[in-house]
Amino acid sequence: MRIEAVEGDITRERTDAIVNAANSSLLGGGGVDGAIHRAAGPALLEECRRVRAERYPDGLPAGHAVATGAGNLAARWVIHTVGPNRRAGQTDPELLASCFRSSLAVAGRVGASSLAFPAVSAGIYGWDPAEVAEIAVDTVREVARTGVVADAEGEVDVGGIELVRFVLFGPDVHAVFRERI
């Protein structure tokens, strides 16, 4: 599994899947979440509403992930994960690591060979970008080393994932991820 960091706009990624730093409602919001929903168009919102109604009526819990189609995006899937909100007292690094593990598990289940992550929880949720980079990169490296990952639905072989790209908005966040890789 190759790991890289680039500065850019995750909505323009041509990976099989992009990861959305979603809120638990799955219905769009600000930051990365809002940008992905705007770029994907109404099909993404409709699918998210269906996922909420059928699987997560109380919202997607922090640290979990779920896949939908990608609407108008170049990617085939959007993998939504809810990062912990440090401003709301969610300060457990394991909960943040779970976002990356769960997203990799979902990517393995849908058959993605490449995926792009944003800096989950580093924006409005108040986590320091350097801490997010450490947790994210270390978690992805560990999953790559073992080739398997477990989430709430069980263990998944992720050997088919060839590329994990961290797509960061702005030079400062990009720099801390690049240093970690």
Image (cartoon, rainbow, N blue to C red):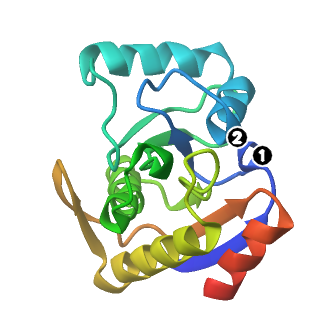
* Residue 163 seen in the current view: no
Q: Nearer the viewer, mark 2 or mark 1?
A: 1
Query: Residue 144 location in percent, x, y?
Result: 39, 79
Image check: 109 left or right of 170? left
Q: Which mark is residue 12?
A: 1
| Residue contact between numbered discs 2 and 1, judged by CB atoms under 8 Å | yes
- Amino acid, disc 2: Ala
Query: Residue 136 location in percent, x, y?
Result: 49, 70
> What residue appears at the point 47 percent right and 54 percent down from the top-left corner?
112
Quadrant location of the C terminus?
bottom right
Image check: 24 left or right of 164? left
> Outermost residue toward the left?
154
Query: Residue 49 location in percent, x, y?
Result: 43, 14
Q: How many marks?
A: 2
Q: Secondary structure at mark 2?
A: loop
In the image shown, does 49 or 91 lie closer to the viewer? 91
* Residue 50 placement: quadrant: top left
Query: Residue 106 location in percent, x, y?
Result: 35, 50
* Residue 121 seen in the current view: yes
Q: What residue is pinned by disc 2?
A: 74
- Amino acid, disc 1: Arg
Alpha carbon separation for disc pair 2 and 1: 7 Å
